Image (tube, rainbow, N blue to C red):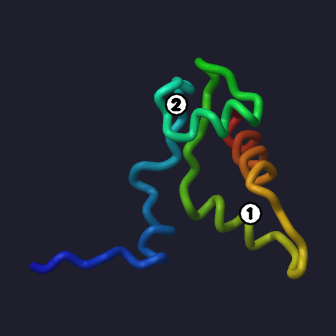
Amino acid sequence: MPYRRKTWEDKLKDRKTFPKTLKLESNFPCYRALQKMGAKPGDSVTIAPPLEVDAIMKHVPEGKLITLRVICEKLAKQHQT
């Protein structure tokens, strides 16, 4: 059976591995970005499912802007991290 690339819809529906709540460590790929947002080593961080990010983005009115920081803050509050 040949390999089939996941479509965007397939990726959005992938909930098997999400959400993940982890303790922040200095070897995380996004460590510096999280540190700039105020996270410290040992803090809980959440890797949210794509559907949750998509839902937040869909609530942004047309012509308005939402920053990555605001999205992260909403997800952190939602997951209590």
Return the x and y of residue 56 as percentages of the image width and height: 74, 63
Q: Which residue is mark 2?
A: 22
Return the x and y of residue 43 as percentages of the image width and height: 64, 23
Within 10 Å of the Cα at label 1, are there few (<14), some (14-19), or many (20+) other Cα atoms?
some
Return the x and y of residue 22 as percentages of the image width and height: 52, 30
Q: Is residue 78 above or below residue 28?
A: below
Q: Amino acid at mark 2?
A: Leu
Instruction: Please state if 55 lies on the left or on the right of 59 as rendered.
Output: left
Residue 2 numbered mark, or none? none
Q: Check the image and name the residue furthest to the left.
A: 1
Q: Residue at x 61, y 19 (%)?
A: 41
Instruction: Classify mark 1: helix, strand or loop.
Output: helix
Q: Mark 1 to mark 2: distance in Å?
A: 22 Å
- Which sits in the foreground, 81 or 67? 67
The quadrant of the picture occupied by the N terminus is bottom left
- Which sits in the foreground, 72 or 77? 72
- Which sits in the foreground, 68 or 33? 33
Q: Residue at x 74, y 73 (%)?
A: 58
Q: Is residue 62 above or below residue 54?
A: below
Instruction: Please state if 49 lies on the left or on the right of 38 as rendered.
Output: left
Return the x and y of residue 74 as percentages of the image width and height: 77, 48
